[in-house]
Image (cartoon, helix red, strand yellow):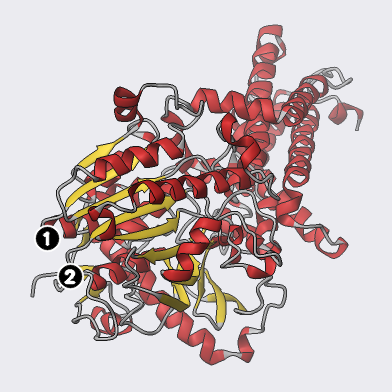
């Protein structure tokens, strides 16, 4: 026993055990920082969460310490030399310090995106303001920074146990056999840790395996750890086509091919009108007293102007985003193409042939414009909008050339009131009809507003509310300034959030379904289009519905539905936190893992506290599975073929 305790194997076990402890403390920090999003922990669920956490931490330990393990177990007398020991310590501390830094950063990141940091986020780190934002985050989270340094210090202090190397085994054969045994055992254990087990039935674990330990998708994120999430999503396969149905059968269940019919006599003919789409950063439905009256008994929400437009426009009362990122919103809104598993615009197959709304209208003689107050290239918006058929784009650089640099918010771009006004001036000079879209910025972390507005805005229940109220007031100014213009009166306005805000206060908004409920409506200044869509709807429904009202009769490709003429409502989006699809038809809500329904709730169970037994509702399960299998098959079929158009018959 004494010989073993003094062996390099025992020292290695000690050092890896310290890593497990550090990862556990990282997870504690993660939960403390995000407890308001995840809710409390029940004693009965803790053991399952710990079991799951150990499984994922084992994979993380293997990923981050594989080189250190090899260095620790390599045979040879030279491994006891000081230079080798120093090299081993450097590798151990460096790799595990990165793991600590990523885990602590992930705790902060999750609070704003409701998902773990994965390899795809690396795409967003190349903006010129990235360094500035990093320092802003550090300044706002000094407690997390201090905790991270404390954990790294623990790694350094605990690296050297009190034991000293014992004398080696003198028998060369016995020593060789012992070293081979140790190496084989270490290899098997590392393989088991990385895969999540050694059984033939066990596939290498991935993010979705966390849901095996809890039905609460938020707490599934508590089980996960980084860099596991990053490593397991590097080079992730984006074309996971599975043929559930023969193609002829598939088209009868669900098809993205649309063949429009004439506008019904009960609806206005808006053909030839201009279109202006405002994509509003983080405009959750919970901000609106009109959409969420139960939250505002006094009728005063944070979007009073938009609420006034919704009362006289056409409002989607139960609208859901098709993702949780801004880059997922644009193709959903502009092209009726959702993002499953990976943001659509980040996969090479997105470069396939498409005919999205800007291009469809451009072919009808529309001039096209996209406006964003951030720097050109931010979030990849410019590349996407060009591929979607937008001819002209205005960015921060264009604004500052004409109006100077005094309106930069210090982080993301031009303050929204000025960029919205800049867009209005530009629209007045464009040939009609036009299609324009603007992406707003201010209602985003770090949740700052112009100094001159601070005393005029409500403090709000969350940090985002002053910014939401500011954007709402900026839109009011836009309507007041340009409302008398002829082009304005001939314009159909579309208002839609990109996704739900990271800052929430309503318990429903913290559920998997409620966490995608957004503001979405159409508005015509002359009151031509009024009413409500009381069915569930989603971002991908905007393009088919708007093209219908505009009188487009040519076939087009879209995953959404025309809410004015197509029945059978059913929403769908890929939940990055649940690693499953979430769908509702306004009566039931389901989770779908890509092959089968895993969870079922009644839609009016808004807090999703009462899961239903699947066996008790076989007809519901069969109906959802049939439809969602067809949606997913169609999606990945077209991604595999790199084609998003209606075939010529």
**Residue 493: which quarter of the image?**
bottom left
Going from N to C along the chain, the mark reached first, 1 or 2, is 1
Residue 312 visible in the snapshot: yes
Compared across the picture, whether 163 is left or right of 546 comes to right
Give percent across and percent down for residue 341: 44, 56
- Residue designated by label 2: 552
Residue displayed at 54% across by 61% down? 516
444, above or below 349, in the image: above
Seen from this angle, which residue lies furthest left? 649
Which mark, residue 364?
Answer: 1
Q: Note whether 272 is above or below 394 in the view shown.
A: below
Q: Residues within 10 Å of mark 1 (few under 14, many from 20)?
A: few
Query: Which residue does the image show at 51% across and 40% down from the upper left?
Result: 442
Drawn side of residue 475 relative to residue 398, left or right: right
Query: Residue 384: horizontal and vertical position, in percent?
Result: 29, 45
The answer to whether residue 188 of the structure is visible from this angle is no
Image coords of residue 392 (percent x, y): 21, 41
The one of 641 and 522 positioned closer to us in this rendering: 522
Q: Do the residues labelled 1 and 2 touch (CB within 8 Å)?
A: yes
Q: Which of 473 and 496 lies nearest the eye of the viewer?
A: 473
**Count of marks placed on residues:** 2
């Amino acid at each position: 026993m004494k010989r073993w305790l003094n062996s390099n194997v025992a020292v290695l076990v000690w050092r890896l055990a310290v890593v497990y402890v550090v990862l556990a403390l990282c997870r504690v920090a993660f939960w403390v920082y995000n407890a308001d999003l995840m809710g409390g922990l029940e004693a009965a669920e803790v053991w399952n969460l710990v079991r799951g956490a150990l499984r994922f931490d084992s994979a993380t330990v293997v990923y981050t310490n594989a080189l250190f393990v090899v260095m620790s177990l390599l045979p040879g007398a030279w491994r006891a030399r000081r230079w080798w020991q120093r090299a081993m310590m450097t590798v151990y501390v460096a790799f595990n310090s990165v793991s600590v830094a990523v885990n602590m950063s992930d705790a902060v990141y999750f609070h704003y995106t409701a998902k773990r940091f994965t390899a795809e986020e690396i795409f967003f780190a190349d903006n010129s303001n990235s360094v500035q934002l990093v320092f802003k985050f550090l300044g706002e989270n000094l407690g997390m920074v201090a905790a991270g340094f404390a954990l790294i210090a623990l790694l350094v202090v605990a690296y050297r146990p009190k034991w000293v190397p014992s004398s080696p085994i003198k028998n060369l054969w016995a020593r060789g056999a012992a070293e081979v045994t140790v190496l084989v055992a270490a290899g098997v254990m590392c393989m088991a840790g990385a895969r999540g087990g050694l059984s033939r039935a066990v596939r290498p674990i991935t993010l979705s395996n966390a849901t095996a330990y809890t039905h609460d998708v938020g707490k599934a994120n508590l089980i996960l750890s980084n860099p596991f999430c990053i490593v397991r999503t590097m080079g992730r396969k984006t074309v996971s086509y599975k043929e559930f149905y023969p193609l002829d059968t598939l088209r009868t269940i669900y098809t993205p091919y649309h063949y429009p019919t004439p506008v019904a006599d009960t609806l206005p003919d808006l053909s030839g009108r201009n279109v202006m789409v405002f994509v509003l950063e983080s405009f959750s439905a919970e901000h609106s007293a009109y959409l969420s009256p139960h939250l505002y008994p006094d009728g005063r929400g944070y979007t009073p102007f938009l609420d006034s437009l919704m009362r006289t426009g056409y409002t989607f009362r139960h609208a859901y985003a098709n993702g949780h990122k801004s880059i997922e919103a644009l193709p959903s809104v502009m092209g009726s193409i959702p993002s499953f598993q990976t943001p659509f615009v980040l996969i090479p197959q997105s470069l396939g042939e498409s005919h999205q709304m800007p291009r469809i209208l451009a072919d009808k003689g529309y001039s096209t414009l996209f406006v964003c107050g951030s720097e050109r290239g931010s979030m990849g918006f410019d590349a996407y909008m060009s591929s979607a058929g937008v001819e002209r784009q205005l960015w921060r650089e264009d604004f500052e050339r004409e109006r100077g640099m005094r309106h930069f918010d210090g982080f993301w771009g031009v303050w929204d009131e000025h960029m919205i006004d800049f867009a209005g001036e530009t629209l007045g000079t464009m040939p009609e009809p036009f299609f324009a879209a603007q992406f707003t910025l201010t209602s985003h972390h770090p949740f700052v507003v112009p100094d001159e507005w601070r005393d005029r805005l409500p403090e709000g229940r969350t940090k985002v509310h002053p910014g939401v109220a500011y954007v709402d007031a900026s839109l009011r100014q836009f309507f007041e300034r340009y409302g008398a213009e002829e082009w304005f009166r001939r314009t159909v306005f579309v208002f839609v959030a990109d996704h739900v805000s990271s800052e929430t206060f309503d318990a429903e908004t913290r559920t998997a379904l409620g966490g995608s409920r957004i503001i979405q409506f159409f508005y015509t200044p002359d009151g031509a289009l009024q009413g409500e869509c009381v069915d569930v709807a989603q971002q991908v429904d905007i393009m088919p519905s708007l093209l219908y009202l505009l009188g487009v009769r040519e076939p087009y490709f879209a995953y959404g539905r025309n809410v004015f003429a197509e029945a059978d409502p059913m929403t769908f989006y890929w939940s990055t936190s649940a690693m499953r699809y979430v769908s509702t038809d306004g009566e039931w809500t389901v989770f779908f893992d890509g092959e089968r329904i895993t969870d079922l709730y009644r839609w009016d169970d808004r807090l999703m506290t009462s899961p239903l037994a699947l066996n008790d509702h076989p007809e519901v399960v069969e109906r959802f599975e049939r439809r969602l299998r067809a949606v997913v098959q169609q999606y990945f079929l077209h991604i595999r073929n790199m084609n998003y158009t209606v075939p010529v018959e």
